[in-house]
Image (tube, grey):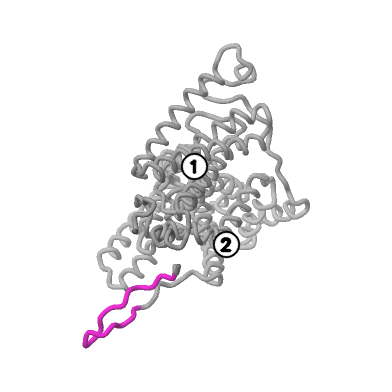
Amino acid sequence: MSTNLTAPATKGLGGKNRPTASRRKLTYPKVLLIIAGSLVLLSLLRVVTGANNLTGSGQYTAALNAAVPIGLAGLGGLWAERSGVINIGLEGMMMLGAFSAGAIGWQYGPWAAALAGVLGGALGGLLHALATVTFGVDHIISGVAINIMALGLTQFLAKLWFGADGSAASAAGGNDKQSPPMTDMPTFTVPGLSEWLYSVEKHHWFLVSDVAGIAGSLVSNVSWLTVLAVAVFALSFFVLWRSSFGLRLRSCGEGPIAAESLGVNVYRYKYAAVVASGALAGLGGAFLAIYVHIFQDGQTGGRGYIGLATMIFGNWRPGGVAMGAGLFGFMDALQLRGGGPTVHALLLLLAVLLVGLAIWKLRAGRLTQGVISLVVAALLGLWYATSDTVALEIVGVAPYIATLLVLSLAAQRLRPPKAIGKTYRRGQGK
């Protein structure tokens, strides 16, 4: 099955087919060039605005921790949707994972909590697979039902298990809204290197200190659960794109009838993909509980939906999901760290980027989009020039605004699996 995407041929003079240019692919040199350009742009922005936290190690440590649960949820959505099943129930599966981690972690430690989170999310995935694959329930309805069910179930069980007067959990610090605390997840630091990078960062040299700040967050107090998440991303790529199992699974999302004709058990692969999807989302929820040492009611905070957005932004590929998770994690970290001045500096960056987008659109002949981009850029520039900071209420919604902006810009290059969301029945092609 070919996944090479090219634009369809068009009719030229005389009615003959004339092939159009294929869509440009992001090669590794282009990705490295984009990363280098982004670093230079951020360094310039830091120098101009004086917002040193923009590339500080503290900001990127928080961003990394915020990106992991979002990325795991997005990766879970990728597994399900590559098999043709829409999984909008990622938020509920994250809730189940976070609750399971809290219920087990205070008694048996963080690694047991992570395993419990995987199992809790997998149960949610199994329920979604049963509804959509076996019984043919609409995928969106099933996902929404799981989100509602998970919210009510975790609230009920938290009150029953953690808040009961006289219980061991209550005596250990639990209540109706949270579990008792668990022990810390082990972290690692590269000795010598982390201190040297921090000393370079404090000098605030152009680009050099910025790179040192970002690199320092990768070698200082990094959770082993974060390392596990990175390994899961790499493993998912090799399983889905470099193995016969992954080829069969992706064929179920592109053409299940054709896959069945070649001997693929489509039901089995869809079940495996959706259960794996729930397990990954559950691990993301467990990360949230382990990071703050407790399960709390409302802990996921919509991160399952943002994970779904990273999957779409990443064009249903692990690398794209990781990049999207990093972006949304950065914005989420701003909210957690109360980064009003940093968000204020980003207004200038966004205005510059919109000017570049406007020039690109105008050169392509898209007058309306170009003018709208220029107008929005001018308004952002005016906002930056007439204010010194951004209200914390706006900082709080920054991750969701970033989600909408990124998805609107990425919409034209998206290519979902062809059979996504379609009900499949064994033997329907006969």
Q: Secondary structure at mark 1?
A: helix
What is the x, y in percent for residue 226?
A: 63, 47
What percent of the width, then of the height, locates residue 228? 64, 48
For badge 2, the amino acid type reads Ser
Residue 19: which numbered mark, if any?
Answer: none
- The foreground one among 372 and 18 is 18
Screen quadrant of the C terminus: bottom left
For marks 1 and 2, the one nearer the N-term is 2
- Dot 2 crowding, Cα within 10 Å, few <14, some 14–19, many 20+: few
For image coordinates 40% across by 33% down, the residue present is 148
Judging by the rendered image, the residue that carries numbered circle 2 is: 243
How many numbered discs, if any?
2
The location of residue 127, given as percent across then percent down, is 45, 38
- Most foreground residue, 81 or 346: 81
Magenta segment includes 10: yes
Mark 1 or mark 2, which is nearer to you?
2
With respect to residue 114, does 188 lie above or below?
Answer: below
Query: Does the segment drawn in magenta span residue 192?
Result: no
Query: Which segment did they paint magenta?
Result: 4-20
Amino acid at the residue labelled 1: Gln
Which residue: 26% across, 85% down? 16
Name the residue tied to disc 1.
335
**Quarter containing the N terminus:** bottom left
